[in-house]
Image: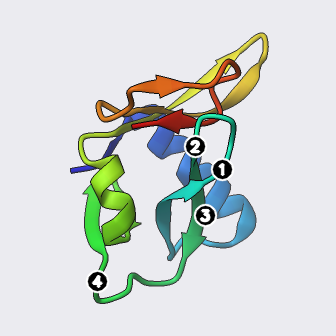
Amino acid sequence: MVSITPYAAEKVREIALAEGLQDQGLRLRVIGGGCAGFQYDLYFEDKPTEMDELFESNGVKMYVDPLSYQYLDGTEIDYVEGVHGSGFKFGNPNVSGTCGCGSSFSV
């Protein structure tokens, strides 16, 4: 299962409204890259594919492809704001290590 905190869900709805994408779901992917091997990828998408895992958390529809799901199972998405910037943060129990800047991970 993949979930999103109430605050992160609020930010997703805010972004969707600003971009005119209110009827779309949030696509979550794991892609190769970064200094630790994998990176998270988020974007809005019209509808899921027939192979996707579907989740809804705090009113946000999320679509995850089967390959990404093996790395994302149990992940909670939050939104953080701080001195060094703001953005979505992934609490992923499958991660064994991250890079120094925190933008990529390994399993």
Per the image, label 2 sits on a secondary structure element best described as loop
Of labels 1 and 3, earlier in sequence is: 1
User: Where is residue 58 drawn, in percent x and y?
Assistant: 32, 47
Q: Quadrant of residue 85?
A: top right
Residue 98: image x %, image y %? Answer: 54, 25
**Residue tagged 3:** 43
Q: Give the CA distance from mark 1 to mark 2.
A: 5 Å
Badge 2: few (under 14), some or many (20 or more) residues near its Cα, within 10 Å? some
Image marks 1 and 3: residues in contact by CB distance under 8 Å: no
Which mark, by number, is residue 93? none
Please say whether residue 36 is visible from this viewpoint. yes
SS for callout 4: loop
Q: Amino acid at mark 1?
A: Gly
| Residue at 62% in and 25% down | 99
Q: Is residue 34 above or below residue 54?
A: above
**Sequence-wise first label, 4 or 2:** 2
Q: Amino acid at mark 4?
A: Met
Name, please, the residue furthest toward the bottom.
50
Which of the two discs, 4 and 1, labels the residue nearer the N terminus? 1
Looking at the rendered image, the disc whose residue lies closer to the viewer, 2 or 3, is 2
Q: Residue at x 37, y 71 (%)?
A: 65
Q: To which quarter of the image does residue 63 belong?
A: bottom left
> Left or right of 15: which side holds 96?
left
Q: Quadrant of the C terminus?
A: top left
The furthest residue to the top: 83
Measure how far apart labels 4 and 1 are at the Cα level. 24 Å
Q: Is residue 25 left or right of residue 63?
A: right
Question: Label 4: which residue?
Answer: 51
Q: Is residue 64 above or below residue 12?
A: below
Q: Position of residue 64 (x, y in %)?
A: 37, 66
Residue for badge 2 = 37
